[in-house]
């Protein structure tokens, strides 16, 4: 009887501890922004961190952010760390340099981010946006989507009374992406929605519901974050794939070489 009671007590203690760990981990959020250059990653960081000068932003024909940077905000003993990254299709350097700089975002927020924000503009979803999502998956792996929220900037482009979910529904590819991210999508407008305190077209309201979504997602992920080990796993898989491709092309080259030699011998 006593043994059963002790077991019960132990199980309640474990449950309480897990719940505490979850609330603790939700208290300090680490967020990595990802998206095309110029989409508004840095400005969104300023909106989330509530500091207009936390990250440099500019309307420019050249990419502005070239290195990963982070800023932290603490409100009611809860911290939010936002990691700003250079954009995919950046105008400087090679694709390899850019990819390794973006990967540094994981180290910048060790042990890893709780959330990836995939930033897109409220505008037509074209092959270039699709390409960016592909690059994100190539870089961080499909599992990264378990930790992802699609966040739209330029919300003012929405029609009067239109919600972001309605906008997404208009395009099956975009809807598919949002579905892969567990249906998580939100919208801000870093230029026009800062003053509005209430209603849909208010960054204050939108950021609050974004944070709730992230917290729910973290709980759903058992309190964990995307880790460097997951990243290494992706790179191991890529290396293996590369080895298979290399081996296959060696076999092909050898076969070509053999048939050339045969050709020479029969000539
Ligand atoms: N109207 C409007 N303008 C925005 C919004 N978000 C960003 N901008 C503007 O768009 C321009 C680019 O924004 P950034 O935040 O610098 O873009 P980024 O994604 O960090 O760009 P890179 O650092 O080059 O990758 C700036 O002039 C911003 O003020 C938005 O929601 N609405
Ligand atoms: Mg930037």
Image (tube, helix red, strand yellow):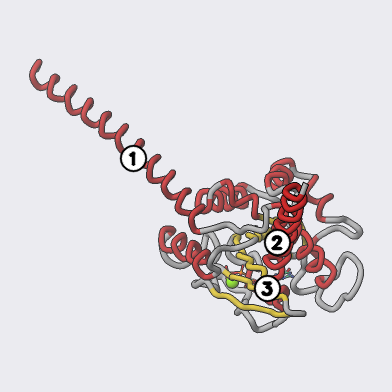
Q: Nearer the viewer, residue 81 or 134?
A: 81
Location of residue 15 with respect to 192 vertically, above or below: above
Q: Which residue lies furthest to the top in this view?
A: 266
Q: In this view, does 112 lie to the left or right of 191?
A: left
Residues at marks 2 and 1 touching, judged by CB atoms closer than 8 Å: no
Separation of marks 1 and 3 at Cα, in angstroms: 40 Å
Q: Nearer the viewer, residue 232 or 264?
A: 232
Image position, residue 27 (x, y; %): 71, 70
Residues at marks 2 and 1, CA–CA distance in whole angstroms: 45 Å
137 vs 1, nearest the viewer = 1
In-image side of 164 versus 224 (left or right): right
Please give the name of the residue rendered at 67% of the width and 58% of the height, measured from the top-left corner: 223
Name the residue rendered at 54%, 58% in the picture: 227
Residue at 67% in and 65% down: 25
Quadrant hosting ligand 2: bottom right
* Labels 1 and 3: the sequence-earlier one: 3
- Residue that mark 2 sits on: 17
Q: Is mark 2 within 8 Å of ligand 1?
A: no
Percent x, y of residue 240: 38, 41
Where residue 262 appears, x then y in whole percent? Answer: 13, 19
222 in relation to 201, above or below: above
Identify the residue under disc 1. 243
| Residue 217 appears in view | no
Q: What element carries label 3?
A: strand
| Secondary structure of residue under mark 2 | helix
């Amino acid at each position: 009887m006593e043994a059963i009671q002790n077991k019960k007590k132990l199980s309640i203690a474990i449950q309480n501890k897990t719940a505490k760990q979850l609330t603790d981990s939700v208290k300090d959020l680490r967020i990595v922004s990802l998206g095309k250059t110029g989409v508004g990653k840095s400005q969104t960081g300023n909106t989330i961190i509530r500091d207009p000068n936390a990250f440099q932003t500019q309307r420019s024909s050249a990419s502005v952010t070239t290195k990963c940077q982070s800023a932290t905000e603490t409100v009611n003993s809860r911290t939010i760390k936002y990691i700003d990254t250079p954009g995919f299709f950046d105008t400087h350097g090679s694709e390899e340099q850019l990819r390794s700089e973006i990967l540094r975002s994981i180290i910048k927020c060790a042990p890893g981010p709780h959330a990836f924000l995939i930033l897109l503009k409220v505008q037509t979803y074209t092959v270039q946006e699709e390409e960016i999502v592909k690059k994100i998956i190539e870089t961080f792996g499909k599992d990264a989507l378990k930790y992802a929220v699609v966040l739209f900037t330029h919300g003012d482009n929405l029609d009067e009374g239109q919600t972001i979910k309605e906008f997404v529904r208009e395009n099956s590819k975009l809807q598919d992406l949002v579905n892969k991210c567990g249906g998580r999508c939100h919208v801000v407008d870093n230029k026009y929605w800062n003053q509005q305190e209430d209603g849909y077209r208010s960054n204050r309201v939108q950021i609050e519901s974004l944070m709730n979504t992230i917290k729910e997602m973290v709980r759903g992920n058992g309190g964990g974050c995307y880790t460097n080990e997951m990243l290494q796993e992706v790179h191991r898989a890529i290396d293996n794939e590369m080895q298979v491709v290399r081996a296959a092309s060696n076999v092909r080259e050898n076969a070509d070489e053999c048939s050339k030699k045969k050709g020479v011998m029969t000539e």
